[in-house]
Image (cartoon, rainbow, N blue to C red):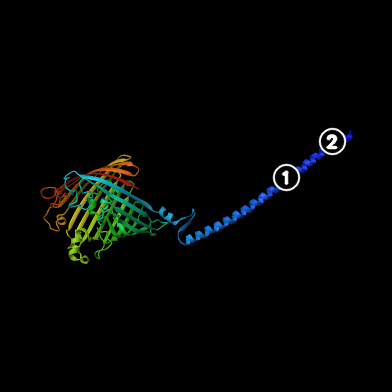
Amino acid sequence: MRSNLITVVTAVASVVLVASVASADQVQEQFRLMEQRMAEMEDRLEATSDDLRTARATVDEQQSLLSDAGLVDASDQGLRSAVGSFFESVDISGVAAASYNHRLIKDTDSVGGNSNGQGGQLFKNPNANTFQVDQIWLTMDKAPTEESRGGFHVEFATGASSQNQGSTNGNSGTPYLYSGYVSYLAPVGNGVQVDLGRLGTVLGAEVVQTNGNWNITQGAVFGLQPVTYNGAQLSTAITDEISIVAGVVNDVYSDTDVSADNEKAYFGQISYTGDSFGLNVGAIGGSADAGECAAGAAAAGARNIECNVSVVDVVLSADPTDDLSVWLNYDWKHVDGSDATGHGDTHGISGAGRLALSDDMGFATRVEYIVEEDTVSNNGVAGADDNELLTVTGTIDKTLAESLVGRLELRYDTRLDDNNGGFATNGDATGTNNDALVALVQLYYEF
């Protein structure tokens, strides 16, 4: 009996021992396989690390080449293209505008409106029953800052109403340089900005770019002011509210690249800008080869001309309420010199306001009065009547979609006193018409 029990125990122990030995062999095999796989993974990781080191070395080498070439810039945000950084600092904007106009008084005349006599160069919609491209305008501006003290500004324009006193290709479809200058912000005081090139005037309440005005047409007082000129100007802020600008240019009215005489024109302006009130007082004076002095220059010789023009300009602006904005613009223009075509004084005053009727609709009106001495309009000869001009303009504007605005305008011009120099040719028996009534509709898109 005991022998049988020993036999059974021995048999069971043998089975357990054999199973344990077999299990240990399997575990050892699994460990071996795992070690083999880990070795393979280490080999792969080592190869990958070699590839990464090689790629990093290539990147560093390329970065060095690009940095040496000035094509990349290192910053705390990493590496980025200098070209992309440049365009990030440049503001690009513009406007595209087109219109239809119809002259309601003497609408059968082929030309007219305000195309003759006082203000002839400023009314940009003289034709009756006419569709036209008003403006295609592109502006690029990189303002100088304390971090980047260099900058530039350039504007290209074309279209019938983009034409200024120095451009003759408004209807040709060829873009022209409206303004363009290089800027430097000098580290003096609050910063003095120096601009050199073709400058836009700081005078006046209205501008050539149509979306900068409340009305479709610029006013008659606008025609007394220069628009652009070539030269240099300095500007700085005295306080948060007061700033000044001063400069020297080739000519009061001409923006050509060549100065026809040895004289220059000088301008300056002081501005106050408050929360709801603003005041600009400025003036320009000096040589004027174009306009009043053109005939004198031809007769006396461009280098010996005796002709000067000065313009004093005052602009008052205010926002009496959140929905109402107004401005008042006064100009005094004086012409003198023995070679001046006409000499004397012209005074103009213009007042305008815009009332917001809703978030996307408004109504604007403008009233103007200009008086021109008889010696100005009659080639220096006294005794004739002074020229007096009155204009009344009303404009409704409506935002039709994002950045798209439609405007409807009615403008009336009348000469209260003149020297047979009315608005529309072939208007009456004497060849002049003292009244002009024009209706205009315009669409413009700004970006």
- Say if 243 sits above or below 359 in the image: below
Res 79 label: none
Measured as percent of width and height from the top left, residue 41 is found at 64, 51
The reply to whether callout 2 and callout 1 are in contact (CB within 8 Å) is no
Image quadrant containing the N terminus: top right
Question: How busy is the neighbourhood of tag 1: few (under 14 within 10 Å), some, or many (20 plus)?
Answer: few
Closest to the observer, 310 or 229: 229
At horizontal 77% and vertical 43% (from top left) the residue drawn is: 21
Q: Tell me, yes or no, if residue 125 can be seen here.
A: yes
Asked whether 293 or 157 is in front, the reply is: 157
> Where is residue 53, by image quadrant?
bottom right
Q: Type of residue at label 2?
A: Val
The percent position of residue 224, horizontal first and vertical second, equals 22, 54
What percent of the width, then of the height, locates residue 246?
30, 58
Callout 1 amino acid: Val
Report the Cα–Cα distance between label 2 and label 1: 29 Å
Which numbered tag is attached to residue 8?
A: 2
The residue at the far top in this view is 1
Within 10 angstroms of label 2, few (less than 14), some, or many (20 or more) residues?
few
Q: Nearer the viewer, residue 11 or 129?
A: 11
Residue 114 image position (x, y, % from top left): 19, 49
- Classify mark 1: helix, strand or loop: helix
Residue position for label 1: 27
In the structure shown, which secondary structural element does the residue marked by tag 2 occupy? helix
